[in-house]
Amino acid sequence: MDFNDPRTTMAIDDLLTRRITRRQAVQGTVAVSLSTVALGGLTVQASSAADAKTLVVASGADAVTLDPQVSFDGQSPLLWRAVYENLVKYEGETLDIVPHLAESYEISPDGLTYTFKIRKGVSFSDGEPLNAAAVKLSIERQIGVEQGIAFALANVDAIEAPDDMTVVLTLTAPSDGALSAFAGMYAPYIISSKAIREHEQDGDWAQAWLRDNMVGTGPYILDSYSQSQQAAFSRNPNYWGGWEGEHFDQLVVSYVKEPATERLLLEQGEVDVALFLPDDAVEELDGTEGIVVTDVPSFNLYYLVLPTREGPTADKTVRQALSYGFDYDTWVNDVMRGKAQQARGPIPSNFVGFNPNTPQYTYDPDKARALLAEAGYPDGGFSINYTYETGYFWKRPLGELFQANMADLGITVDIQELSPSAWADLLSNPETANHAFGLVWWPTLRTPYDFMFSLFATGAQGTAGYNWGYYSNPELDSLLEDGAAEPDEAKRMEIYAKAQDLLVDEAPALYVYEKRYRLPMRDAVKGFVFNGVYIETLNFYDISKTA
Amino acid sequence: MARYIARRLLFMLVVIFGMSIITFSLSRLVPGNPARLLAGPHARQEQVDALAERYHLTGPVLEQYGVYVSGLARGDLGLSVTTRRPVAEDLAQFLPATVELTATAFLITVLVGVPVGIFSAATRGGMFDHASRLVSIAGVSLPIFWLGLVLQVLFYKHLGILPIGGRLGTLDIAPPRVTGAYLIDSLLAGDLSLFWSSAIHLILPALTLAAGSVAVVTRMMRASVLETMGADYVRTARAKGLTEPSLLRRHVMRNAFIPTLTVLGLQVGYLLAGNFLVESVFNWPGIGLYAIDAIANLDYAAIMGVTLIVSVVYVAVNLVVDILYVLLDPRITYS
């Protein structure tokens, strides 16, 4: 501003001496009061916590589809479980399978016939009654869409409805996980038969319509859904479970992409539960006022899988050496800050069929060196590739600790980060997969077979499973098949115990750790019960909020 | 003029065509098999193959491109691996949100950048000029992502006067869709509280997005006003006794505005790119957020769709800019 310029001084004089007219005064006052009201309104808006009858959930992962039978992703089941139900379910936090939409069930002694009595008086939210025909159609649909849990129903030979409220399944061969295929997070959820019939298009089993619409028997009804934004549900007034006691009237599930944002929302009380937050954010929230972090055992097991087809790690002795060469205690105590424990073999310690007598490796670099020498690599002298996908918070530190430990043995570990799609592509192709990688597994079926087959069976290599270390051992394969087909429980567990011992001895992977599940939520939320099979979902019907 | 426009439109098609080839090839070059991810861990090879067929992920690259282009002519942009819906449907859902955000940021850029630039030039060397220079440098240097997060912490966490993100409050229901822009739709539906909610949700993201843009436009405007003010004809007009405000309005503005117009056209491109970051920070469900997820999933069709839209918008905006030149500067004619 040039004060020598007469125009400037004139402008300032003008400003200072301007007489304010009455009209301007009134306008000014009105403007001021409006903006105060507005700010007041803003304040109310910004800190809007929902009332006690609405649950607001933030999820850091976007649901993929509302169709509960066509996906194996980890994000969508949260929404499925508000509206859809299964014939049976896991009780509370246990692995006990109890009737749900089925009133009762019976398995024949030879394990080939499953009889379900359907619960009476239940209907879908579109009015269609729940009966044997509806159940049969849903199961046929699951098999027909060839996605989701269809692979576990491969043994199903026939589905019959001898009367209106009974469904009978006949299997070609017994399988110990068969019943749990109907109980888990991925299961043939019972969808309204009317909806399936009416919205069927070109033999797609109504997939196009059910992608964005939901019609089930569950406690809630879908009000609105927009992809990558939010899903809103309200009470199903005709829910067969009734509405005695404390239940939410409304549920809102919002997708929040940024962890920092999701965390702030929880801290400010604008959401009640925050799912899929990274570990470090969860740890920082622990102890914050108004927030409680659940701390319960899960069925997750975290492996460092080794490539077994070629190179030095094709040799069992080398793999055993590596198993002795990894510092489990540092991982558990320092990296995981004590929120984990070292795994004992390929099955989580709280899971059915766990063998408590399976041997466990300890950190013993001298033993590792001795074994390496025995295998012909006295000073190491070779390298291993380790790869992980972007976004998996624990996989990089795992690779780095592995790298440091291996360096002590004279082995070089090259770490490579890839996008999830590239990672999956690299490893599921036997031509390109020669990498060690971190992997977490939790059970889809209630059987140790689930862990051991998916990760180590010959039939699970490449695109057919997760055996991307390409381990192949006919002895293991036959143990697993024998176990699955064995009708006697005690004998079956013995076989599985042998399989675990074998897998520890063979060491196709390092069995690194088990972790507790920690979910942050507002302390007003009550009634959350965690079940490791239903991980990253909520038991909506049973939760409530104190005001 | 009409021929000029026709030629430019034709050229636009060429540009889009070129963009599509480049994006198509680049995305195919990146390793990864989305069909595999889609099918899940328990799928048999036949299922993976069937999915690859369905999403046109198999066959020679040229053939895939051919299928894609012929689909384009029908309005079929392929299927998204991320949402498992037609990409055209996804874009129709997400685009209005981005347009609303970008348009608001653009409006802020023009309504703040231009006057501030002019005033800085008019009061050159003064306090205001110095202050605006500082703010401009800050606006251009501060990373959008960081700025967004800081504004969130300040206005949401500490002051509690603005929401943290999203287009509406958690319990609000979107207005019936007419344009897809909630500001307009809520007014059309006569719902004032919804209008208010969408307006305050728009403030932080639009400001964050506009920050760098405002800075550039301010400096550009200032520079071109100063340059114009030094011209002979301006000196003559002043000598004839014309007052400063009149001078600014009648002689300087129109001529100074032309270079800024070019910059504004380019800024639209910058704003469109900035969307990706702003939408991520503020959870704004537009094509930026959609694209980020698509890229992580190697969702070719979605990536192509977003790229095409952005190219079309950018080219169209610059065509509009060129036409505006003619209106502003009689010396410019197109044959």
Image: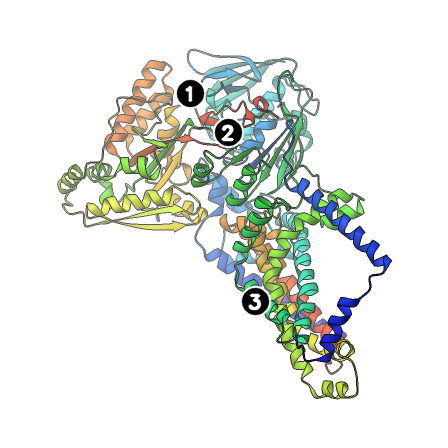
Amino acid type, label 2? Tyr
**Residue designated by label 2:** A186
Tell me the residue at 77%/70% (across/down).
Answer: A14
Q: Is residue A544 above or below residue B42?
A: above
Q: Are callouts 1 and 3 both on one chain? A: no
Q: Which of the 4 image quarters holds residue A477?
A: top left
x, y percent for residue A272:
57, 32
Are the residues flagged by discs 2 and 1 in contact, CB closer than 8 Å?
Answer: no
Q: Secondary structure at mark 1?
A: loop
How far apart are the alpha carbons under marks 1 and 3?
A: 77 Å
**Residue designated by label 3:** B134
Report the mark closest to the observer, 2 or 1. Answer: 2
In which chain is the residue bearing label 2?
A: A
x, y percent for residue B73:
66, 57
Report the mark closest to the observer, 2 or 3. Answer: 3
x, y percent for residue B250:
78, 78
Q: Nearer the viewer, residue A377 or A266?
A: A266
> Reading the chain from its start, which is encountered first: label 2 or label 1?
1
Q: Is residue A406 left or right of residue A533?
A: left
Are the residues flagged by discs 2 and 3 in contact, CB closer than 8 Å?
Answer: no
Q: Is residue A345 left or right of residue B202?
A: left
**Residue designated by label 1:** A173
Assign the C terminus of chain B to one quadrant of the image. bottom right
Q: Nearer the viewer, residue A21 or B152?
A: A21
Note whether residue B326 is visible: no
Q: Residues within 10 Å of mark 1 (few under 14, many from 20)?
A: some
Amino acid type, label 1? Ala
Residue B132 image label: none
Report the mark closest to the observer, 1 or 3. Answer: 3
Colour scheme in use: rainbow
How far apart are the alpha carbons under marks 2 and 1?
A: 21 Å
Q: Nearer the viewer, residue B283 or B114?
A: B114
